[in-house]
Image (tube, rainbow, N blue to C red):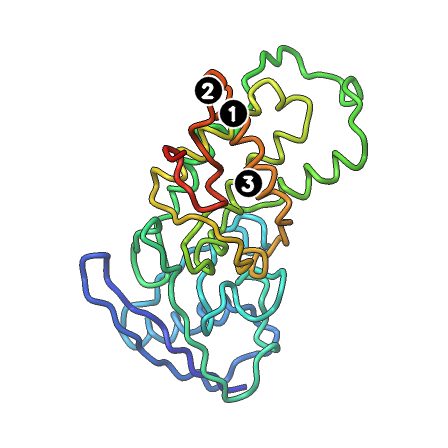
Amino acid sequence: MKLTLTIWRQRDRAAKGRFVSYRLDDVNPEMSMLECLDVLNENLSERGEEPVAFEHDCREGICGSCGFMISGIAHGPLPATTVCQLTMRHFKDGDELVLEPWRSKSFPLVKDLIVDRRSLDRIVQAGGYVSVSTGNTPDGNALPIGKDIADRAMDAAACIGCGACVAACPNGSAALFTGAKIAHLGLLPQGQPERDERAVRMVAQMNAEGFGGCTNIGECVAVCPKQISPEVLARMNLDYLVGSWKHRHGTVTAISPIIGWGPDET
C-alpha cells in the first residue's frame, strides 16, 4: 500500500519546526506505525538525510514511551491502542497521515516527535509510593483483599504514563494520569496510612509542573490506551479534599482541582 507521512521536523526546542511530507510506496499492511517509521528512516539514511527522531522501547504497548499524534488523534484512530500496536492495515491505500509530537507546555519538545515527559515522573516521585518497612518478602495471602478492590486497583495501575491524556485534553490536564497513580495505591490497604497526604503532594506537584485544570471534557479517557476509568478523577478529588482539610487543621481552604479551582483558593 502507498502512504504519505507528513511529519513534524524540529531539530531542538529552540529551532523553528515545520511539516515535511514523505511518500512510501511499498508499505506492508501488517507493519506497526513504528515499523513504518523504521522503513522511512532506512530510506532517509540511504539518501544521506536526517532520520526522524521518535521514542520507543518495548514496542508491546507496555512502556508508554512511543506516543505521538496521528492526524490529530493521540496514538491514532484505533481505541485502546498505543502507536507501537497500531498496524497500517487500519488505514487506506493512498492515505496521508500527519504525525506530530504531544503539544503541551509541560512536555518540552526534544526533537521531531520526541518530548520530555519527566514532569509525569516528578508527580509520581511526589507521592506515588508507600513508605513501609517491608522486611522479608510477605506472604502473598497474608493480607486478604477483595476481588472488586483488587480489580479496580489493577485497572488504575495499568496506566503506562504515555501522556496521551495530556496531549488530547484541551486544557493540557494531567488529572487522569495523576488520579490513576493516586487511586491504585489509595484503593489498597497498604496505601491507607499516606492516602490523604499522597493526594495533596501529587496534586501540588501536578500544578507546579504547569498542567492545566480538568473540566471533565473526557478526551483523556477517549484516547487512553489502557482505558483508565474516570472514576480515578473522583477518587483523586475526594482524597485531595480530605487531605487538604486535615492539612489545614479543620479549615477547608483548598478545593479539588477537578472543579477547576487552584490549590490555594477557597
Q: Position of residue 20 (x, y in %)?
A: 31, 77
Residue beneath the point at 61% across and 49% down: 230
Disc 2, disc 3: CB below 8 Å? Answer: no
Q: Residue furthest bottom?
A: 94
Q: Quadrant of residue 236?
A: top right
Mark 2 neighbour class, 10 Å CA radius: few under 14, some 14 to 19, many 20 or more: some
Q: Position of residue 144 (x, y in %)?
A: 80, 23
Give the CA separation, mark 1 to mark 3. Answer: 14 Å
| Residue nearest the observer in this picture, 38 or 194 | 194
**Mark 3 neighbour density, 10 Å: few (under 14) some (14–19) many (20 or more):** many
Q: Secondary structure at mark 3?
A: helix
In this rendering, position of residue 229 left or right of residue 249: right
**Position of 1 relative to 208 (above/below):** below
* Marks 1, 3: nearer the viewer: 1
Horizontal and vertical percent position of residue 211: 38, 47
Residue bearing mark 3: 179
Side of 182 relative to 265 (left or right): right
Q: CA distance from mark 2 to mark 1?
A: 6 Å
243 or 90, nearer to the observer: 243
- Category of crowding for the residue at label 1, using alpha-carbon neighbours closer than 10 angstroms: few (below 14), some (14–19), many (at least 20): many
Q: Quadrant of residue 28?
A: bottom right
Front residue (pair 203, 33): 203
Which residue is the site of mark 2? 247
Query: Residue type at mark 2?
Result: His
